[in-house]
Image (cartoon, helix red, strand yellow):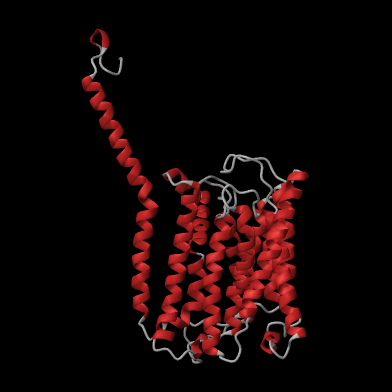
Amino acid sequence: MRLFLMLALVSALVTFVGSIAVWKLGLKYKLYPKIRDRDVHTRPTPRLGGVAMFVGILAAFGVAWLVSMIDSATFAQLEIVFADPFQVPAILIAALLIVVMGVADDLWDLDWMTKLAGQFIVAGLIAWQGVSIVSLPIGGPDGGIIVGSSWLFATLTVFTIVLVMNAINFIDGLDGLVAGVALIANGVFFLYTYLLVQKTSPFNYFNLASIIAVVVVGACIGFLPLNWHPARLFMGDAGALLVGLLMATSAVSVTGQINPGSLEVGELFPAFIPIILPFAVLIVPLLDFGLAVVRRLRAGKSPFSADRGHLHHRLLDMGHSHLGAVLVFYGWTAVVSVGCLLAFVFPVYFGIPSWVAFALLAAGVVVLLVLTLAPLGRRRRLGAAADLGAGESGSETPSPAGLPADGR
């Protein structure tokens, strides 16, 4: 565990220092776009935080590789992550390409077809170099695992990565929103992969999914101080697409390294966690993405055309403050992802049935629904009070010349 903590710390520190440097350079050379109608912020703000996050993530991977080479006796198991000479380099090259494209979009506003083509290219690069879905726990003779065509799963991998990248990018509209959601989601996913590897391979705690998740956690921690409301620096498309790319890659890599069918658990649900948990930690971005696509297609627009109808915009319109809307997103991400994690932890480690975790999840959902909808009730009460006050004022104050109280 200490190596994971060290990697997170390296990623956080390098990202933080890089964020300060990028922020100062962005202000000095005016590397920021004009404020758009749909934007929530009111002052020009640099959008190149994704560059700093990439440098932090790259530094953490570099430290992991050096540790595996220098202290191979202590961290011999870490060599498994770098055993394939092309896998990790392909991920980092794909990350670099998506950051370059994101920076170009942040500065010059690329058209959506160019961006989508770039996303498919980087996703294809990752799938081509072996980070691909290879099995699904949906039936089959080998412990509930079914293995399909490599082309089928490579295609599924590409579309999954592109979907997650766009889902993360779509919610990037409030200060601290994506960084905080990604911090919670990757933190939960790291715990899951770490605990699952302990259970399925007790002599090797290291795997690609855990390392990716923990370095993304570090990058988000390092970036948040400059991105917290009021933000001095945005991660931009470069950062949002980078985070989405790595989150999807982490989730995909689990299926190639871990056989959940080897768990000796009397329930079926834990075997489905590799499929369910990635979607659970991304429940809010995926919901926003789906609603946006449907909304824009119904209006006869491109599904990637910008508008002011995202969930965070709706929360602001409901009456939530900027911070309140962000905390609502954090709450939904934490409740759903932790609830699914407990559905794995309870039966595997404590012998507690999964339904207890689902009961806690349901209770959390009820609480969050109340908190999410609270501004609507407050607005209704204020409106009723205002109407009552206006009525009382009209009945007690005589109008001049015998006219009605409204002057008409």
Q: Quadrant of the C terminus?
A: top left
Q: Is residue 259 above or below residue 153?
A: below
In this rendering, would 252 be left or right of 121? Answer: left
Front one among 243 and 374: 374
The residue lying at 71 percent from left, 45 percent from top is 32
Front one among 309 and 31: 31
From the top left corner, tell me how far across and down residue 311 is, in percent. Answer: 48, 52
Front one among 242 and 323: 323
From the top left corner, tell me how far across and down residue 305 is, in percent. Answer: 59, 48
Q: Is residue 324 above or below residue 187?
A: above
Q: Kindly tell me whether residue 308 is visible in this rendering.
A: yes
From the top left corner, tell me how far across and down residue 274 is, in percent. Answer: 52, 78
In this rendering, would 125 be left or right of 209? Answer: right
The residue lying at 47 percent from left, 51 percent from top is 325
Q: Is residue 30 above or below residue 48?
A: above
Q: Kindly tell me whether residue 311 is visible in this rendering.
A: no
The residue lying at 31 percent from left, 15 percent from top is 407
Q: Quadrant of the N terminus?
A: bottom right
Q: How many marks?
A: 0
In this rendering, would 137 be left or right of 110? Answer: left
Q: Quadrant of residue 366?
A: bottom left
From the top left corner, tell me how far across and down residue 223 is, in percent. Answer: 64, 59
In the picture as drawn, the residue positioned furthest to the top comes out as 401
Q: Is residue 266 above or below residue 246?
A: below
